[in-house]
Image: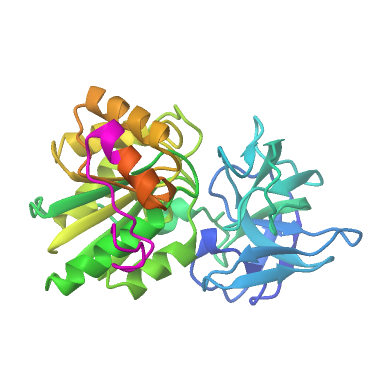
Amino acid sequence: MTGRNLPADVKRTSVLRRVPSLAAVQFRRECGEEGDVCAFELPLNAFPVTVEATTGRLMAILPGDVFLATPGHRQSTKWVDGEIPAGGLTPGEQYWVLADCGLVGDLVGNSPSEKGHLGRVNYLGRVYCERGGALNIRQFALSENSEPDCKKSVYLVLGTSGDAGKTTAVLAILRTLRMQGQANVIALKATGSPLFEEISRYLDFGAAHAFDCIDFGLPATDPSGRKGISEVFDRMLDYCLSLPADALVVECGGDLFGANVPVFLTCLRARRPDPKIVLAAHDALGALGATQVLAEMGLAINMITGPCTDTPTFRDRTEALCGIPALNLLRSPGEEGNSA
């Protein structure tokens, strides 16, 4: 079906960061599926929304703006639940911006948390390249690496929920490894919804390379139980573990049960049965439950951090319940007072 041309500098969300610049952008009124580069328009009667641009900066989408994003799934314990309807997005219908990175689909559930990205947009159609082929982020994924495993150390950061302090823990590990002279470290955001701002922070804190699911052809690792996700995780791990480096630091977005984290842990254990694990937890009971769940998977936590370590009393209770060292990685040493 016929479509329409868009300017080459049309606004793009960060989920499309690997898609190269196009001299001409054309969309056609066709259904959009996961990962397709698609055109959307914010209605004239809507409020502006903010999303993440391909550079990582916050970008305003104003009423009447056309922008490029992709259909995607999102399941969250704290933010937004949404999905791609059966058959994909239909041209002329309205859908919701589900995540800062530019995932768009049906809204399943919302939360009270404030979100700048959440708004209804009109779906216009799929984007085609100059040569006439439809674009999907899978086409720009990293190529498979056939090099052998370099046997580098693996540091794994898990959380009991969103906003539990996982990224803070990753940055603390990166900083510590750099201070120890390990200058060549790879960082991987393995599960959940991607955010280029997180990748940029990994690089700022010393990671030589930083990757997430977009680099391996997926806009997000949701929904749980999706077909073929283990193959994606296998490619992800084989690629990262084959790169020459001193260590690999992995953050699993979401909680222990969401975003296919259990599948990822199974894939990782096949390659590293005993990674060094840091758990970020909101409270001591959550930390205790996660300790028991991971033990059933054959994994042992080396350290606990997060809000459950915000005060000496909370930290001591967490250590006593779990029998694992607990440390607040958000504050500098000495900020907790004499008991730190």
How far across and down, in percent of the image, does residue 41 sit?
Answer: 78, 59
How far across and down, in percent of the image, does residue 256 sit?
Answer: 39, 34
Q: Which residues are magenta?
A: 319-340
274 left or right, relative to 60: left
For the stretch drawn in magenta, the main secondary structure is loop
Q: Residue at the spot x=34%, y=46% of the render?
A: 315
105 falls in the magenta region:
no
**Can the viewer see residue 18?**
no
Task: Write down the quadrant of residue 248 in the picture.
Answer: bottom left
Number of numbered discs visible in the structure rendering: 0
Q: Quadrant of the C terminus?
A: bottom left
How far across and down, in percent of the image, does residue 259 sit?
Answer: 45, 37
**Can the viewer see residue 156?**
yes
Q: Residue at the spot x=62%, y=57% of the render?
A: 69
194 left or right, relative to 180: right
Its colouring scheme is rainbow
Q: Is residue 1 above or below residue 128?
A: above
Q: Residue at the spot x=49%, y=45% of the render?
A: 162
Q: Residue at the spot x=33%, y=39% of the render?
A: 318
105 left or right, relative to 285: right
Q: Is residue 91 above or below residue 294?
A: below
Q: Is residue 138 above or below residue 290?
A: below
How far across and down, in percent of the image, does residue 249 sit?
Answer: 25, 56
325 falls in the magenta region:
yes
| Viewer-closest of 92 and 170 | 170
| Viewer-closest of 43 and 320 | 320
Q: Is residue 25 above or below residue 258?
A: below
Task: Write down the quadrant of residue 200 in the picture.
Answer: bottom left
| Viewer-closest of 47 and 317 | 317
Task: Write down the quadrant of residue 12 in the picture.
Answer: bottom right
**Residue furthest top as drawn:** 296
**Residue furthest right as drawn:** 45
